[in-house]
Image: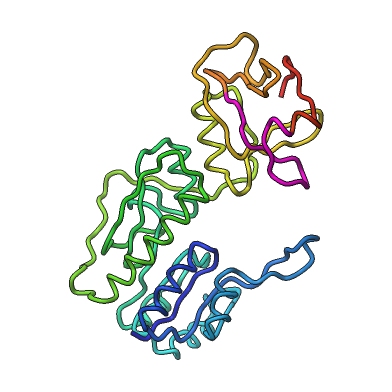
Amino acid sequence: MRIVFMGTPNFAVPTLDALVAEGHDVVAAYTQPPRPGGRRGRELVPSPVQRRAEALGIAVRSPASLKGAEAQAAFAALDPEVGVVAAYGLILPRAVLDAPVHGCLNVHGSLLPRWRGAAPVPRAIRAGEAETGVGIMQMEAGLDTGPVRLEGRVSVDGKTAGELTAELAALGAELMVRVLANLDRYPAVPQPNDGVTYAAKIDKAEARLDFAASAVEVERRIRAMTPAPGAWFEADGERIKVIAADVLPFTFPGGAGETVDDRLTIACGDGAIRPGLVQRAGRGVTSAEELLRGFPIPAGTRL
């Protein structure tokens, strides 16, 4: 099929690769414009989709908006049979949604209508869900309200947001290829009216750990924020990111947020956590044991 692809982060790359491997004619890849980044935040860094599309020899377009008539006409001039969208990051106006013969299909990382919106994977982890998934949705004007053609399910099972996102990205690419191979076999089924939840974008303020919550909730937040933006606490005026932690179901004396031993065990509102992997600002990931050798956090420290 003649396809216009639209995506930006790493989540979208497996779908782009799958379309090319299947022999589809990807005539252009739309992606977000390069953003400031690099070691000093001064370089303009292209998106993962831009880098991959260029490596594949696909023309890249990165308009700041698709609301204007000129941008919409440029899209329609590509004469696509279908638009394939995966975490693009821009709202698609009705003129863009309607331009392809078969409309636009979106890879969405949840089991709709649960977790519509920008951050379905970390929200599912924070909510303690045992299962999530990915769906191929026929796009319409509403926020992830379109009918779904095909879904796949996966277990959350203690995974971080990064691990779960990568798994869903691979599965979503596989499902998209299956749908495109036979659109009639996978008709668009309207979403149920019940069970709608919204996955708001992660605010950086959410990354600060709240030890007044239960140990189970704290550990979920750590996994939901890994690898980015990274859950953290403050000790001696310095932020320490927690990359992984174990939940200890014991009650300890002292208040929430207090270290109860010399192994960085931290009391929570219910139970405690013991970080296994941590990271100081500007340094690499290390074990908690290694951290404590050069940055002591004695028992009784309030974090």
Q: Is residue 90 left or right of residue 290?
A: left
Residue 102 screen position, x and y as percent:
30, 79
**Position above or below: 109 against 222:** below
Name the magenta segment's main secondary structure. strand
Q: Residue at x 65, y 36 (%)?
A: 208
Horizontal and vertical percent for residue 291?
74, 33
The structure residue drawn at horizontal position 30% and vertical position 43%, both measured from the top left corner, is 195
Quadrant in which residue 80 is drawn: bottom left
| Residue 196 against residue 234 in the figure, above or below | below
**Quadrant where the N terminus is found in the figure:** bottom left
Residue 167 x, y percent position in the rendering: 43, 55
Instruction: Please say if 152 is above or below 21.
Output: above
The quarter of the image holding the C terminus is: top right
Q: Nearer the viewer, residue 283 or 66?
A: 283
User: For this rendering, which residue is in front, 179 or 275?
Assistant: 275
Taking the spot 72% from the left edge, 16% from the top edge, the residue there is 299
Q: Is residue 240 magenta?
A: no
Residue 282 point in image, percent of width and height: 78, 47
Q: Give the magenta-colored segment's residue range.
A: 273-290
Which of 76 and 1 lies nearest the eye of the viewer?
Answer: 1
Inspect the magenta stretch and tell me whether residue 284 lies in it.
yes
Seen in the picture, residue 232 relative to 301 is either above or below; the reply is below
The answer to whether residue 153 is left or right of residue 274 is left
